[in-house]
């Protein structure tokens, strides 16, 4: 496969991966708002239900983009190691670093959100509030 084809594949993979990551992060933010406010589509949620959303949805939605980005970074490093031409090799390593920094940023923000949600849920009464 020539270098031009590889660059096209790399750009396509990066665009597809970015779209998936942003979509999943949007879902995670919606779940965070549901957990913190305790309201989903106008219905008050119990503390138990909020914990269930936190453990079953939010944690997975925050872990998934990090895993996708780490996997993408690893794939682009491997691809760069296999390339002979310095141009596509440089593009591959630069793309890998973008994926890695994205994963790091999402992980740091995820830990911050995690602490905030935990502190919010620990302060919630056991019965849903009437809103």
Image (cartoon, helix red, strand yellow):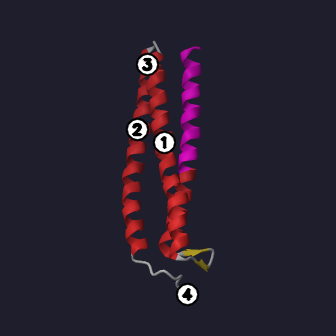
- Observer-nearest residue: 33 or 46? 46
- Which circle's residue, 1 or 4, is located before the other in the chain? 1
Q: Which residue is mark 1?
A: 67
Give whichever of discs 1 and 2 has the lower sequence position: 1
130 above or below 21?
Answer: below
Q: Secondary structure at mark 4?
A: loop
Location of residue 26 (image quadrant): bottom right
Q: Quadrant of the N terminus?
A: top right
Say whether residue 41 is magenta. no
Q: What kind of element bears circle 2?
A: helix
Task: Say whether disc 2 or disc 4 marks the residue closer to the N-terminus.
Answer: 2
Residue range in magenta is 1-22
Pointer 3 local density, CA inside 10 Å: few below 14, some 14–19, many at least 20: few
Q: Residues within 10 Å of mark 1 (few under 14, many from 20)?
A: some
Q: Earlier in the sequence, mark 3 or mark 1?
A: 1
Distance between mark 1 and mark 4 Cα atoms: 38 Å
The percent coordinates of residue 14 (x first, y second) are 54, 36
Position of residue 128 relative to residue 53, above or below, is below
Mark 2 and mark 4: Cα distance apart in space: 44 Å
Local SS, label 1: helix
Q: CA distance from mark 3 to mark 1?
A: 21 Å
Residue position marked by numbered label 4 in the rendering: 130
Residue at mark 3: 81
Residue 54 location in percent, x, y? 50, 63
């Amino acid at each position: 496969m020539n270098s031009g084809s590889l660059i096209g594949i790399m750009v396509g993979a990066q665009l597809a991966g970015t779209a998936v990551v942003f979509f999943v992060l949007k879902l995670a933010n919606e779940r965070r708002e549901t957990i913190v406010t305790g309201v989903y589509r106008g219905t008050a949620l119990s503390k138990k239900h909020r914990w269930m959303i936190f453990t079953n949805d939010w944690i997975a939605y925050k872990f998934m983009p990090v895993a996708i980005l780490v996997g993408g970074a690893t794939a682009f490093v491997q691809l760069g190691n296999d390339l002979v031409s310095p141009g596509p090799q440089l593009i591959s390593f630069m793309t890998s670093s973008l994926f890695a920094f994205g994963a790091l940023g999402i992980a740091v923000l995820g830990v911050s959100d995690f602490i905030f949600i935990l502190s919010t849920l620990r302060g919630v009464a056991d019965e849903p509030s009437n809103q």
